[in-house]
Amino acid sequence: MLELDNVSSYYGESIILKNMSMKIEAGKVVCLLGRNGVGKTTFLKSIMGLVKTPGGSIKLEGEEIIKMPTYNRAIKGIGYVPQGRDIFPQLSVYENLLLGLERNRGRGTIDDSVYELFPVVKTMLGRKGGDLSGGQQQQLAIARALVSGPKLLLLDEPTEGIQPSIIQDIARVIRHLKEQRNMTMVIVEQYLEFVMEVADYFYLIDKGRIIMEGSTADTDPDAIQEKMAI
Amino acid sequence: MSTYLLQIFNGISVSSILMLAALGLAITFGLMKIINMAHGELIMIGAYVTYMIQNVFIQYMDKSVFDLYYIAALPCAFVVAALVGYLLEITIIKRLYGRPLDSLLATWGVSLILQQMARSIFGAPNVDVRSPVWLDGGLVLGDVQLPYKRLFIIGLVILSIAGVYIFLYRTAYGRRIRAVMQNRPMAQSIGINTRKVDSVTFSIGAGLAGIAGCALTLLGSIGPTLGTNYIVDTFMVVVLGGVGRIVGTVAGAGAIGVGNTTFEFFTNASLGKVLVFLMVIIFLQWKPQGFFTINSRALDE
């Protein structure tokens, strides 16, 4: 589904990711772990084209996308839920959802299945996005990404600052998307318990490089925790 | 009583002209944060387009249809100013997003070029546009006559504001524009071509300036510096109303227009202007964000 080969990313003149290579199979949930500032968010931004990636290759279903503008990558089928949610604060919840259809060039309607996954979103369609709580905004941001049925969903720290009950809702949605829709997901996370619950595979990143990887089923969480603490 | 009625009407009339001139700026400056010093020259272009359409009607059309020239001039002024705005955006403005001082200087340079171009094409002296006959005279209310031209401009302003509101808040393209202005990277990430949206948005702001220019031909002769007279007032309207809010532009224009005529009534034209500036400065010291501010949990964070 997604293949990165020797990708390096820059913020201005600073190199953040160094020669990152990775292959993510369709239908798998892959988590990127690591402490703050190691390049996890930059990794997702590189896939979306939001940071400079002068070298390497990023292929989505075999198609090279590294030179594509961000909006075209979205149209190609990548859904992105950034850290901090980034919902449009002055637009209503309904307008935020409608904008999710832009990936389909504004065509289509909001499928009821989105409301089934996040029933709370349906109860506040007329409210401004900026007036929602952090947890509600997170649910709206994921719902907006799902409106157009992406092939690949990128989630940046979906549990950050969210109350435990909503974290469970998000975990339930991720499992549903994997099992029912066979959706591929790349999740950046620091919450190890959540990763072990939802992910098939993990990569541990430090200083812009992969220092550990493996199947979540076959890896002892304590070993990951130990590496993360170093 | 009639004096007060006339005074109120004058206030609304001045406000309406300011509103029309500032409406385009409310988009380019208010939404896009571009300090476009050439906005006045886009108004001037709208005025000269009206002049040219008038001349075309005089030269090539039957006299009986002359009065319709103004109806043709309105959309033409919008389209020509929008095209100039589009060219400006794709050549200069696109390099200046997020650089307010650079945009101020560059667009000031553009304004001087456009003024000189107008001088070279139409000559330095002002030219007159003959108003259509159906705008002669006025509506008589007791001892007071309200000129049809001014009433027409008020109507045009109401239509323009309604049009902008419907476009921005009731259409898919307007939704895209608001999304891009609120969070550009996220707008790109959901599949919006933000470069295209920038160009179209700037063109619409420029087109509205063209309509303002067309309206101004009803009030007097036009010249290369026509827009320069409005640039300070229009920026003041947008800042006073609250950057980023169309309703703020309406309120800002109302306050400055009515304030101008009221102070002028009790003092004189120069002192009236000084008092308005003073009031605006005092108000902005107290409320720097203007009449209408954008409050939201997400923006506060």
Image (cartoon, helix red, strand yellow):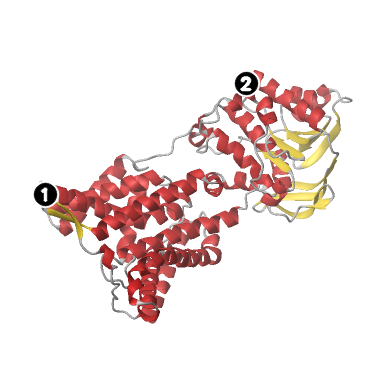
- Which is in the foreground here, disc 2 or disc 1? 1
Which numbered marker is on residue A163? 2
**In the rendered view, would you say A19 is above or below B82?**
above
User: In the image, B151: left or right of A75?
Assistant: left
Find out whether the residues at labels 2 and 1 contact each other: C-beta distance under 8 Å: no
**In the rendered view, would you say A123 is above or below B143?**
above
Q: Position of residue A105 (x, y in %)?
A: 66, 48
> Label 2: chain?
A
Q: Quadrant of the N terminus of chain A?
A: top right
Q: Position of residue B173 (x, y in %)?
A: 55, 49
User: In the image, B249: left or right of A131?
Assistant: left
Tag 1: amino acid: Ser
Which numbered marker is on residue B2? 1
Q: Position of residue B52 (x, y in %)?
A: 38, 75
- Nearer the observer, A112 or B186: A112
Q: Residue at x 48, y 47 (%)?
A: B168
- The answer for how far apart the CA atoms under marks 2 and 1 are is 65 Å
User: In the image, B96: left or right of A146?
Assistant: left
Q: Residues within 10 Å of mark 1 (few under 14, many from 20)?
A: few
- Nearer the observer, B252 or B104: B252
User: In the image, A146: left or right of B68?
Assistant: right
Q: Residue at x 84, y 29 (%)?
A: A200
Q: Position of residue B247 (x, y in %)?
A: 38, 44
Tag 2: amino acid: Gln
Res. A42 image quadrant: top right
- Nearer the observer, A103 or A142: A103
Q: Residue at x 77, y 52 (%)?
A: A65
